[in-house]
Image: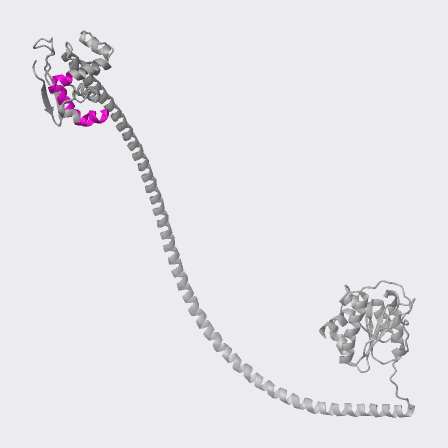
């Protein structure tokens, strides 16, 4: 039996063999060169599986340290020692072949019979034929190598085709991206051109506006200079006019002083005449008082005008409207000597504070009239319509203010007319009422009529 040969290709040891099993004739089954890579890897895998099933006395010394490893680890990390042992150690190869007969009896029997299954994997058949050294195993190895080469070429072709397809897709994607980028770049360029055009337009407009502003400034400066000149001329004219006015004012002051002197002289004469006439009237009145020998009295004609007695029963009645007037006329009338102020009570309260109850209206008005009588020293009489009082007529008065209620069957207007008729002719009598009929009646009797609004504003003023 001729010993096996081993060749090294790079870092991988390749098993070559030219061996003769017992019963083989020398020179048969010669194989030159390394085993195909696929066949070699399968031989190593079968040797690794068989190594794990061998006993300690069956394992070559060089492989004992790999026996405890996992089959996958032995196949990957102990491939070179396993391939060397299969190639150099015929006994180890035969033991691997024995394990192969046990694990694949049909394939082994077919190979030893010289007719491998047609449907079997060529690599599996070649590896088994190599380990069994079956008849014609070099041809089977060669066929497996060719099949593996074809498969590798097909795989490489398929991979190349797939790579080309991926590259074509990448190229198409890059082209599409390039077109999109070009379109974006063109859009950016167009936007930049539009923005540049807009900036140029704004710049031209700004330059035009600046030129117009410069012309406007020049015009304004011209008008300002003209205005300054006109103002200077107007100022000079005004100063001249002021001098003339001052001269006329001085003349007028002289004339006024002369007129004042003449007025003082004339007023002195008039005052002397008026005082002389007043003294004559006063002395005549004093003489008349002595001649008539009238006793002194504090009674007033209004004291003799009767109203509703306190405590008498009354019924209800409504109020009439009222206009407004100026309180200044009332102040002038109250300044007259011995003036008698007669107030239509409800007519005034309904004008000033109509939301209050009637009792509160009467109290508020009488209190305000007391203050007015104290300030003006006038005789004040306040008349209320007794028909508007619920129940009994109250007894009501205030310091310096006479309070009267109309009798049953009589209204406050009638009471006011009786008070006016009771006064002597010539005495100043003022009636406060917005009732036009009352105002007209008292005027015919010689009294003065004032609106209720005037008295309300006068009382509010204090």
Q: Is residue 238 left or right of residue 41?
A: right
Q: Is residue 462 left or right of residue 111?
A: right
The residue at 88%/88% (across/down) is 296
What span is in magenta? 65-93
Marker count (numbered) = 0
Q: Position of residue 90 (x, y in %)?
A: 12, 17
Q: Name the image quarter holding the N terminus.
A: top left
Determine whether 56 is above or below 243 in the image.
above
Principal SS element in the magenta part? Answer: helix
Of residue 309 and residue 353, the one placed in the foreground of this image is: 309
The residue at 85%/62% (across/down) is 318
Question: Does the stretch in magenta take in 88?
Answer: yes
The residue at 13%/17% (across/down) is 91
Determine whether 257 is above or below 81 in the image.
below
Q: Position of residue 397 (x, y in %)?
A: 83, 75
Question: Does the stretch in magenta take in 44?
Answer: no
Q: Is residue 165 visible?
A: yes
């Amino acid at each position: 039996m001729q010993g096996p040969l081993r060749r090294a290709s790079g870092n991988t040891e390749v098993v070559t063999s030219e061996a003769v099993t017992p019963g083989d004739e020398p020179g048969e089954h010669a194989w030159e060169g390394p085993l195909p890579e696929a066949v070699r890897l399968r031989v190593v895998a079968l040797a690794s599986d068989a190594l794990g099933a061998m006993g300690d006395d069956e394992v070559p010394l060089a492989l004992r340290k790999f026996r405890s490893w996992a089959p996958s680890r032995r196949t990957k990390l102990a491939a070179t020692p396993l391939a060397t042992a299969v190639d150099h150690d015929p006994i180890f190869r035969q033991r691997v072949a024995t394990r192969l007969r046990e694990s694949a009896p049909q394939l082994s029997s077919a190979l030893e019979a010289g007719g491998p299954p047609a449907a079997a994997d060529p690599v599996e058949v070649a590896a088994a034929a190599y380990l069994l050294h079956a008849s014609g195993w070099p041809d089977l190895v060669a066929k497996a190598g060719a099949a593996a080469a074809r498969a590798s070429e097909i795989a490489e072709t398929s991979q190349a085709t797939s790579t080309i397809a991926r590259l074509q897709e990448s190229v198409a994607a890059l082209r599409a991206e390039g077109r999109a980028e070009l379109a974006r770049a063109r859009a950016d360029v167009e936007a930049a051109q539009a923005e540049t055009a807009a900036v140029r337009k704004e710049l031209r407009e700004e330059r035009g506006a600046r030129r117009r502003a410069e012309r406007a400034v020049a015009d304004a400066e011209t008008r300002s200079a003209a205005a300054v000149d006109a103002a200077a001329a107007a100022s000079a004219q005004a100063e001249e006019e002021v001098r003339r006015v001052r001269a006329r004012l001085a003349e007028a002051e002289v004339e006024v002083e002369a007129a004042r002197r003449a007025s003082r002289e004339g007023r002195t004469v008039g005052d002397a005449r008026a005082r002389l006439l007043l003294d004559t009237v006063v002395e005549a009145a004093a003489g008349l008082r002595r001649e008539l020998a009238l006793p002194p009295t504090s009674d007033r004609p209004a004291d003799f005008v009767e109203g509703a007695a306190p405590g008498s029963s009354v019924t209800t009645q409504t109020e009439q409207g009222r206009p407004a007037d100026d309180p200044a006329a009332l102040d002038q009338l109250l300044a007259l000597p011995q003036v008698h102020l007669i107030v239509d009570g409800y007519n005034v309260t309904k004008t000033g504070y109509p939301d209050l109850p009637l009792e509160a209206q009467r109290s508020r008005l009488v209190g305000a009239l007391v203050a007015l009588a104290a300030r003006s020293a006038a005789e004040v009489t306040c008349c209320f319509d007794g028909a508007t009082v619920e129940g009994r007529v109250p007894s009501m008065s205030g310091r310096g203010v006479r309070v009267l209620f109309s009798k049953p069957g009589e209204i406050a207007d009638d009471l006011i007319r009786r008070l006016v008729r009771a006064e002597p002719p010539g005495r100043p009598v003022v009636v406060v009422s917005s009732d036009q009929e009352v105002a007209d009646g008292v005027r015919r009797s010689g009294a003065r009529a004032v609106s209720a609004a005037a008295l309300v504003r006068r009382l509010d003023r204090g």
